[in-house]
Image: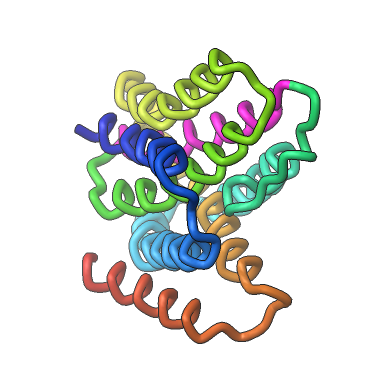
Amino acid sequence: MIYLALIIPVIAGFVLVQLIKPNSKLFQLFLSFSGAYLLSVTVLHLIPEVFSNQQKNIGVFILLGIVLQTGLEYLSKGAEHGHIHGHDFEKRIPWLLLGSLSLHAFLEGMPLGLEENENLLVAIVIHKLPIAIILAVFLKNSSLSKGYVFLFLFLFAIMSPLGSWTSSHYSHLYQYTDQINALIIGVFLHISTAILFESSENHKFNLQKFIVIIIGFAIAFLSL
């Protein structure tokens, strides 16, 4: 069930792009909602749980997650938080984009294999949908063959389930549950704050975006 839930957003994003042209304003609002929800789950649930176990130097792994995600976004040109441009990968197969998005997806799926966490699953699903839409738009407008487009989407779709499967089937990883979760906390903190701070046009106050963010915070709080 978890594997299917992680794959559905990728399929949904691709289908939406094929059937309708995504509204830029609505997309940005949904992106802000996903960022707010992801940040809320991270701050209200993941961080307290990790620090409650009093693992030594656990904060270092959070910082490593931030550094890792910074590196991944350099390769993907910011696709994880809604930024991607066709000219960034002109006239070549975007292996760096695929690799960075796939590694990101693999890592975010790992905590789900270590322990059952419905709130985290929902946050990942909500976060994955706008990424899938952005990716589908890029692939649709690219000069890549249909074979490469299918391969690209297939690999991206299976990486989160693969991360979950890997952590659940290799028992020695359980002893590093807190470290893995801390790493993912760093990744999520970077992504969610980037979404919230970079999706404003010219950094102007946007009432609609502000309301959507508050709704995202409230829903995440009430669901915990």
On the picture, is 158 further left or further right than 96? left
- Which residue is painted at 34% across and 62% down in the image? 45
Residue 190: x and y, percent? 60, 57
Instruction: Return the residue found at the far top.
Output: 147
Q: Is residue 177 visible?
A: no
The colour scheme used here is rainbow
The one nearer the camera, 224 or 55, is 224
Q: Is residue 82 above or below residue 11?
A: below
Residue 105: x and y, percent? 48, 35
Q: Is residue 170 above or below residue 46?
A: above
- Which residue is painted at 26% across and 47% down in the image? 117
- Which residue is painted at 61% across and 67% down in the image? 199
On the picture, is 73 further left or further right than 217? right
Q: Quadrant of residue 74?
A: top right
Q: Is residue 176 visible?
A: yes
Q: Quadrant of residue 159?
A: top left
Q: Quadrant of residue 41?
A: bottom left
- Which residue is painted at 42% across and 28% down in the image? 157
Say if the magenta span includes residue 187.
Answer: no
Q: Is residue 38 above or below residue 70?
A: below
Residue 104: x and y, percent? 54, 37
Q: Quadrant of the C terminus?
A: bottom left
Say if the magenta span includes residue 104.
Answer: yes
**Magenta extent:** 93-114
On the picture, is 157 further left or further right than 168? right
Residue 194: x and y, percent? 62, 62
The one nearer the camera, 172 or 22, is 22
